[in-house]
Image (spheres, helix red, strand yellow):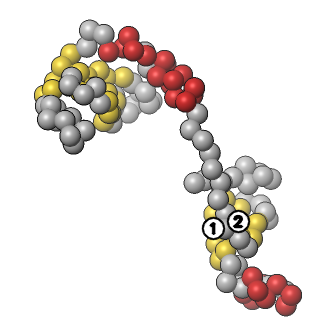
Amino acid sequence: MLLFCPSCSNMLTITPLPPHQLAPEDAPLAHQNRFECRTCPYQMVLDRRYFERRDFDLKAAEAAEEVLGGAESWKNVDRTEVRCKNDACPSTTAYFRQVQIRSADEPMTTFYKCIKCSQDWREN
């Protein structure tokens, strides 16, 4: 999980609190960690368990699939000999398509879809 500084938006790192910099009243914090920004003076002491839950946004995933062509993108694609990523499926044939999803100097990403179980995966 990445957290970002509320002051300058740079990535926060986790570092131990240096015991020699603590005031006497903060002695119980001597073995604690903190979120620390390497750019500005922001820090947040982790004096309790820190947990943040983010639910998966299904609508965002569907929107990403639409960018890549949606269900119609698998229409009229070629087949290739490749082992299915689903361990329970014995298939060695899958549909495939290639899409340039990164910059032009990067290789294309190959998307596969198993003919038998419809498991899909990708390889960069």
User: Residue 120 in the image: x percent, y percent?
Assistant: 32, 30
Q: Give the x, y percent position of residue 106.
A: 38, 33
Disc number for residue 36: 2
Residue drawn 71% across the image and 71% down it:
48
User: Is residue 90 depicted above or below 5 in this figure?
Assistant: above
Which quarter of the rendering shows the C terminus?
top left
Relative placement, left or right, of 93 versus 37 is left
Residue 24 falls in image quadrant: bottom right
Amino acid type, mark 1: Ile
Residue 57 location, quadrant = top right
Q: Quadrant of the N terminus?
A: bottom right
Give the answer, above or below, for where 70 lies relative to 93: above
Determine the image quadrant of residue 44: bottom right
Q: Secondary structure at mark 1?
A: strand
Q: Which mark is residue 14?
A: 1
Percent x, y of residue 91: 15, 31
Residue at image location 73% in from the left, 49% down from the top: 9
